[in-house]
Amino acid sequence: MFRYLIRRTLWAILLFIVITFVTFVIFYVGPNDPARSVCGGQQARADCLVTATEKLGLDKPMPVQYYRFLKKLVIHQDLGTSFATSQSVNERIKEAAPVTASLVFGGAILWMIVGLSVGIFSALKPRSLLDRMAMVFVLIGVSAHPVWIGLIFEYVFGVKLGWTPIAGYANFFGAASDTGQAGGPWQWFYHLILPWMTFAILFAALYVRMIRANVMETLNEDYVRTARAKGAPERQVIRSHVLRNALLPVVTMLGMDIGIALGGAIFTESVYNLPGLGQTAVIGISNQDLAIVQGVIVFATVAIIIFNLFVDLLYAWIDPRIRLT
Amino acid sequence: MALLEVNGLSTSFRTEDGIVQAVEGVSFSVEKGQTIGIVGESGCGKSVTCLTIMGLNPKRNTLSRGEALWKGKDLLTMKPSELRQIRGGEISMIFQDPMTSLNPVHTIGKQLVEAVLLHKDVTKRVARQRALELLKAVGIPKAEGRIDDYPHQFSGGMRQRVMIAMALINDPDLLIADEPTTALDVTTQAQILSLMKRLQEDFGSAIIMITHDLGVVAEVADDVLVMYAANVVEQAEVHDLFHRPQHPYTWGLMGSLPRLDADVERLTQIPGQPPSLLRPPSGCRFHPRCPYVMEVCKTTVPELVPTQRDADHLQRCHLDEETKEREAAKLLAATMAEAAG
């Protein structure tokens, strides 16, 4: 287990270096001139360009630039300064990350609840009414785009029924401020219900299908027959022998999908006007604010790497075949 | 009273292509401490017979008729909770493939303890002690150190020993072994067979041994059922079966036994494949492959009837007794000659 941990951690570090390098190359060595972005694009004044080039270290050879970029990142955890607003990128991300984290993890919990309950029940009662309804839900969830779903939810639940806010975010820890912005756990939850539903529907659909297939396959395993032959009651067979095996791959999938879902968060954040990482990146791109975009990407990849590492270790802990190799 | 009495057991499966009659009209009984061999090619209904007795067929598409009386009570109509008490307690089962029959995510100790706790009201510590005892009995070396290992840390033969330990842990009256040696290599097969024989003496369990290997039957069985295409085609005491086989299918099986002492070229085989049970052949189901086929075989289903010589020797064939005696004697002489020469 210890050696597995070491090996897996070394891989994570290597992955980090490769990804930061690629990000760096795309943004600093590509045809874009970062200095031009700082000085306001096409109309940039020559003296501004010179100062900016010097300040950003663009006159140095590329390996040196990368080294300085990496050093700043690793030693000072500094992602630089926004070209457009001169705000520290770290500050901006610190504000945006909790929003996205709330959305992604809350959404993941929601899709796991739906995926597990509907998936397992469908597998145990295939061709039942619920199973068939679940398959219709899967079809809709997989086919419909989150932006469309988001707008429909907004219209139905927010505008027509008036049950939920239409857009915006409320800070979990903050109190309601006099600027009219709501705060506190309940407001946080209240504002995120629709975004969670929108965000989770695609993955809930995929997970229902995957969990249903896994459970049905595991039900046919020889060791499940062995458990029944031992005289184990059906509930114990399902819990101790079927689910434990059927849900192993789901843990890995979850680790990877949370990373993929982070990309999908951009849509949900745009529809509901949540000031998260996705929206920050979108604004950064439209402003040609490379520092912000790069900061979001580096932060997101590091988050995904750490999360995947955590999931792999969790997987090794629950699957003895991996633990011991 | 017989321990297990199976009367006219039939099982069919509803599939997308139609109804598959997997077992038809099988009857036999098992006495205390006795060993019954069920032999036949793959897909002839041997395993389904036993899974039906155990109530382990998928419920959704299975239909069973007949009865399987366990100490006088019918297993087929029993309440699930009652059946669970018998399964793994009084009747236990060993399966063909030890590589997939143990749950990969639990230690073997945990799986053995689970079997004990399902049937006996004892503490975990006592159950674990019992598990350890059984692991030693089936010959797992250094059982104390291996009880907390996972199935993938054992070889195939060792896993089958664990399965046997699990089957015997509650001192069952009947052990159903579904091709327990098929997935193992030859030397391991011999070890497992002799282990089972020894344990049968120690534990006094009756055994139903399912196999496609007549050699295994000759080794362990008292009575033998030969099955072909869902039917029993011959049923006899083991000595009788080997000395006076009555059915051309049995002759075929005997002729295709590989012998170390005979010419390899003389290894014969039964031509063709077992028929599809979705649309079995008319008349005698063996007629398309039978070298002695007559007109009557193609139209009339032969009954399972006793031979004139012996009321306990049942066979299902239209051939006259004289021809059968002659052919059986010829086969026996050939086997003897090979063994001698």
Image (spheres, coloured by chain):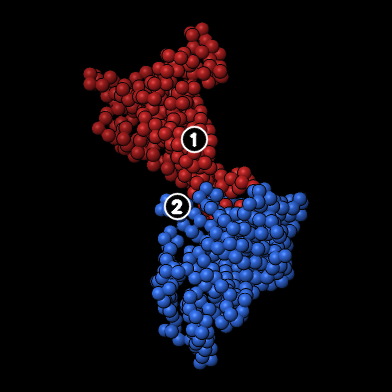
| Mark number, residue B266 | none
Establish if B240 lies above or below B58: below
Amino acid type, residue under disc 1 in the picture: Leu
Q: Looking at the image, do the residues carrying marks 1 and 2 touch, with CB atoms under 8 Å apart?
A: no
Amino acid type, residue under disc 2 in the picture: Thr
Q: Chain of mark 1?
A: A
The residue under the point 56% across, 73% down is: B305
Q: Colour of chain B?
A: blue
Of helix, strand and loop, which one carries label 2?
strand
Label 2 crowd bin: few (<14), some (14–19), many (20+), radius 10 Å: few
Label 1 crowd bin: few (<14), some (14–19), many (20+), radius 10 Å: some
| Mark number, residue B15 | 2
Hey, which quadrant is residue B162 in on the image? bottom right
The residue under the point 47% across, 44% down is: A213
* Residue bearing mark 1: A130
Residue A245: x and y in percent read 54, 48
The residue under the point 63% across, 59% down is: B68
User: Is residue A155 among the parts visible in the rendering?
Assistant: yes
Query: Disc 1 to disc 2, how far (Cα)?
Result: 23 Å
Q: Colour of chain A?
A: red
Establish if A271 lies above or below B107: above
Residue B200: x and y in percent read 69, 69
The residue under the point 49% across, 80% down is: B320
